[in-house]
Amino acid sequence: MRDSTDSRHTAIHRDIAAALAGLVPADPTIPPHPYLRRHLAEHAAEGNVLDDEHVPPALLAWETSSEVRRLLATEDNRSDRRQWLHAWARLEPFARHTDPVSRLTSLRLSHYAAASLPQARAKETAPPQTFNATPVTPLWSHYASPVPAWAATPSDVTSLTAVESANGKVKAIAAGDKGGTLRILRLDGSLAHAPIEVHRGAISHLLPLRGGLIITAGTDGCVAAVDAVHGRLIRQVIVRREHTWVSSLTAYHPTGHLPLLLAAFSDGHVVAFDPGRFQAHALALPELEDSSAVMCSVQMPDGHACLLFTQRDTVNCFDGHTVSQHSRHPARVRALLPMPRAGQYAVADEDGHVSLYDLTATAVGTAPLATARHAAPVTNLHVTSLDQQPALVSAAGDGTLRLWRIPGLRPIEGSLPAHTAPVTAMTHVDVAGQNRLFTAGADRVVRSWPVDRQTFAQAPKAWNHITASALSPAPRRLLAAARASRIVVWDLATNRHRTLLKGRKVTALAWPRQHGRLLLAAALSDNSIVCADPVTKRQTGPVLRGHFLPVNALVALSAARGELLASGSADGRVCVWDLQTGGLLEDFGHHRFSVRCLATHQSGGRAFLASGGSDGAVRVWDVDGLGQVGRSIRCDQDIINDLAFVSWHDGGLLIASAGQDGTLKLWDVETGRLTDELALHDGELGAVTALRLPLDRTALAVAGRTSIHLWDATAGRHLLRIVTGAPLRTLKTVSDPDGAASSILLASGEAGTMAFRLHHDQL
């Protein structure tokens, strides 16, 4: 009877999904009915028809449930009928607040990137008219689509914990970030409440209590309390110690005393307070000698609690009366965790060692019960379960996770590549009977993983990061990308490629000319620069030597004295070279630190070169006169990651600077005056490039942590957001040899490289 009822329920939802899918307009510029945007995907999932036919790409441009990722997680993901849905799931956390055209554009590029991978079988199966409204046409891609994120945050997440309601069920995840903001996220990754401003520094610790109460601690030396169920701050200051930070926060139940909470501060002081009224309690506690001490409480077999705390490479035990050293480790201890079994604890150090100890063995130097080794410094430990048995998870600075069987610390499967940056926090939740691990990284992404063997059996992707890329000027369309000690040059017109300079690690690329012949200049890891002919694949011309540290940027220059090459290096110097003789024409050593980027421009018969670097300054040089133009510009953007010249409509010349602080600024080249500033709220800006639009307009393409933002600099308005889901380090544009109404844009980063045509008349 139950099976019959379930079958009827499924059939009803299948029929509803089929009927609703027929109501989705084929033209994605026409908004579907709000009910379709909100509920069509759910009906399709309930009817076991969650596929591209029942949830077409035209709907995804308007989809508002933000649950496609969650619904796909319960389905068989091997179906080829869900290619567009999977492409959208990779973008969904980052695209919630984008306009429909930006969504559709991002969806098309995401699908194209997945279809272009060697193992992919996907084809663009959507009706051609679906993408008539998008201003881009993909040309070429070798780009690893990001692992779908559970949530994306505007700042690095530094702490995570599960939020328990009064009945003990987990209803949400709390995430604290480095800006002091606490976000309460539902289990689908959406915000349950408005973000709560709690601390003036990073939220370094979150301690959950029953009833949805969370104790927070930060680098501002403050401990606070938040009601996560209702999303409100209930005690802004429980305790504060000025000019310190909280190094550890733990629960502690000493013998003959009420349960307490302990906060350790960087000055060695430990404060005890009760979790009810938040009143301080006088308690005999040891003074800590390590400003980064970690604490935890371990329940002993006889019922009393021992307080463990670290002192650099040792773990000490406080039994309520005396302090004794219990274990010593090869490097500074970074994580300390009580085990489910009484008297046992796990410890991890910054060399990657993970060990399990028993406190009932009281002798100093007692051997561990088990040891293991993570391949990178461990940043976090967490206890979870696998096959209804406890297991230990270690997170590391290389973004990986390892799962270990307790008590032997035997590895369970392999290393899981969870993040592209260090893992900063972990927690776990039982979701619909499945144990899931939530991890946060310095890549500003929170991901959710099922704790099973299949997840940890995922082999790390053999994906070599792009170290440099360059797009040739018109009329040729050659794309050069350096990865894995070789350079591959693709002809975008024929999709053929060839390999140059095998066995040489490359740090920067550019396309100069010599006697009308197009060459590829490559900066090598030995600090030298060489040129190669892409036709003969042979090195040509003299080797350019003179830098003391690796070259970070190369640009080709056309000046009165001929075709030149400029290089910017980590040694703080900008050098201008004569390619024919190999001679060094000028050495601008004015940057205090590393030169990160170069840009060039020709105007009124003059050639300009701009440089920006880690000193936060921008300098503009006259290539013909070999002197500086105007004064050095102090940008106040932390590190300058990229520059682009902007020809203004009134004949003036500006320089755009993309900063580590997430701002884009425009400066007058002659006066050094700030003319405009744009905050994109997309993390660190990695690249910027300029392109000319119809009606004498100038647009800037800017790469943030998750997206490419196109901004009309003339009108001062947003044009388009292309969601990538991963940071980019290179954005370059060249005129399209097939017509003046479009440009070719190169986007390159840690996930790979993509080139696409940008249609000006559709911006």
Image (tube, helix red, strand yellow):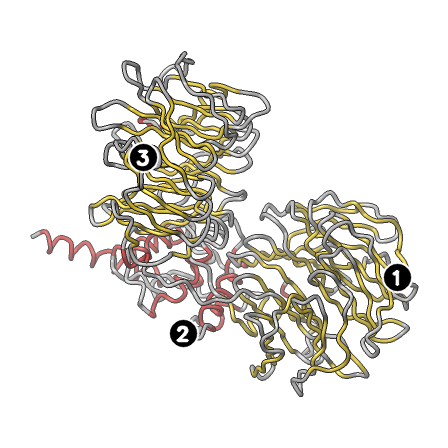
Residue flagged by tag 3: what amino acid is it? Answer: Pro
Q: For the residue marked with disc 1, what is the amino acid? A: Asp
Determine whether 134 is above or below 486 in the image: above
Q: Residue 271: percent from the left, percent from the top?
A: 45, 19
Q: Which mark is residue 243?
A: none
Instruction: Give the class, few, some or many, for how many residues have Cα within 10 Å of label 1's Cα (few <14, many ≥20).
Output: some
Secondary element at image label 3: strand
Q: Which residue lies under the disc numbered 1?
A: 622
Residue found farthest to the left? 1
Apparent side of residue 762 relative to residue 714 in the rendered image (left or right): left
Label 2 packing within 10 angstroms: few (<14), some (14-19), many (20+): few
Q: Secondary structure at mark 1?
A: strand
Image-based side of 410 in relation to 444, left or right: left
Q: Nearer the viewer, residue 129 or 470?
A: 470
**In the image shown, does 632 or 589 lie closer to the viewer?**
589
Circle 3 sits on which residue? 338
Measured in 3D between alpha carbons, the distance from the residue under mark 3 to the one under mark 1, in whole angstroms, is 64 Å
Closer to the chain start, of discs 1 and 2, is 2
The residue lying toward the viewer, choosing from 48 and 639, is: 639
Q: Which part of the image, by quadrant, shows the C terminus?
A: bottom right
Tell me the element at label 2. loop
Residue located farthest toward the top when viewing the structure as drawn: 282
Q: Which residue lies under the disc numbered 2?
A: 119
Q: CA distance from mark 1 to mark 2?
A: 49 Å
Identify the amino acid type marked 2. Answer: Gln
